[in-house]
């Protein structure tokens, strides 16, 4: 016995497939969203092999993971005060770039 789907059933099936695909592509599996970038300016108060802690101009202490920064770049930039561009990943600020001084180059 051969059954053919009606035009309504085909449209409904196509809509459900599209919705499922959209949910997969935009679901919570993406660890980073586009609005997570934050730039911090401040002075280094503590440093480990994988993090720095900044005292910002807003009197906040912010710990930033530096594992994405090449060791020689990090060593060259780490002076008293720095500017760090970050991305938030799994609740942690990850340094994307670091520059000597707490002012952005203009």
Image (cartoon, rainbow, N blue to C red):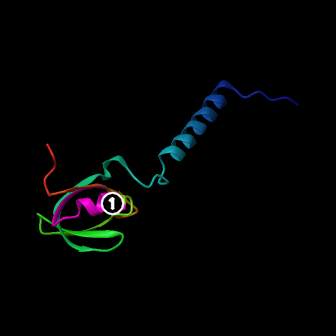
Q: Quadrant of residue 56?
A: bottom left
**69 relative to 25 in the view: left or right:** left
Q: Which residue is labeled 1 in the image? A: 72
**40 relative to 92 in the view: left or right:** left
Q: Residue at x 15, y 57 (%)?
A: 101
Work out which quarter of the rendered image holds the C terminus and state it: top left
Q: Residue at x 29, y 56 (%)?
A: 86
Residue 74: x and y in percent read 30, 61
Q: Quadrant of residue 20?
A: top right
**Residue 46 sits above or below residue 78 on the image:** below
Q: Viewer-proximal residue, 14 or 106? A: 106
Task: Answer few, some or many: residues within 10 Å of disc 1's Cα (few below 14, many 20 plus, some between 14 and 19).
Answer: few
Q: Viewer-proximal residue, 14 or 85? A: 85
Q: Viewer-proximal residue, 65 or 29? A: 65
Q: Residue at x 31, y 57 (%)?
A: 73
**Residue 52 sits above or below residue 8 on the image:** below
Q: How many marks?
A: 1
Q: Residue at x 66, y 24 (%)?
A: 7
Residue 10: x and y in percent read 66, 29
Residue with the most extreme right position:
1
Q: Viewer-proximal residue, 7 or 95? A: 95
Q: Could you say whether the residue bearing mark 1 is in a helix, strand or loop?
A: helix
Q: Which residues are magenta?
A: 71-86
**85 relative to 56 in the view: left or right:** right
Residue 17: x and y in percent read 60, 38
Q: Quadrant of residue 68?
A: bottom left
Does the magenta segment cover residue 72?
yes
Work out which quarter of the rendered image holds the N terminus and state it: top right
Look at the image and tell me whether residue 48 can be seen.
yes
Does the magenta segment cover residue 78?
yes
Residue 77: x and y in percent read 23, 59
Look at the image and tell me whether residue 94 can be seen.
no
């Amino acid at each position: 016995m051969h059954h053919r789907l009606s035009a309504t059933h085909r449209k409904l099936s196509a809509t459900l497939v599209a919705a499922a695909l959209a949910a997969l592509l935009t679901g919570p599996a993406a660890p980073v969203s586009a609005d997570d970038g934050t730039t911090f300016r401040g002075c280094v108060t503590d440093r480990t092999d994988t993090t720095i802690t900044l005292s910002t101009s807003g009197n906040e202490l912010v710990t930033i993971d530096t594992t994405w920064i090449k060791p020689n770049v990090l060593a060259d930039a780490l002076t008293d005060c720095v500017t760090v561009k970050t991305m938030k990943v799994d609740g942690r600020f990850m340094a994307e770039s670091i520059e000597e001084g707490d002012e952005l180059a203009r």
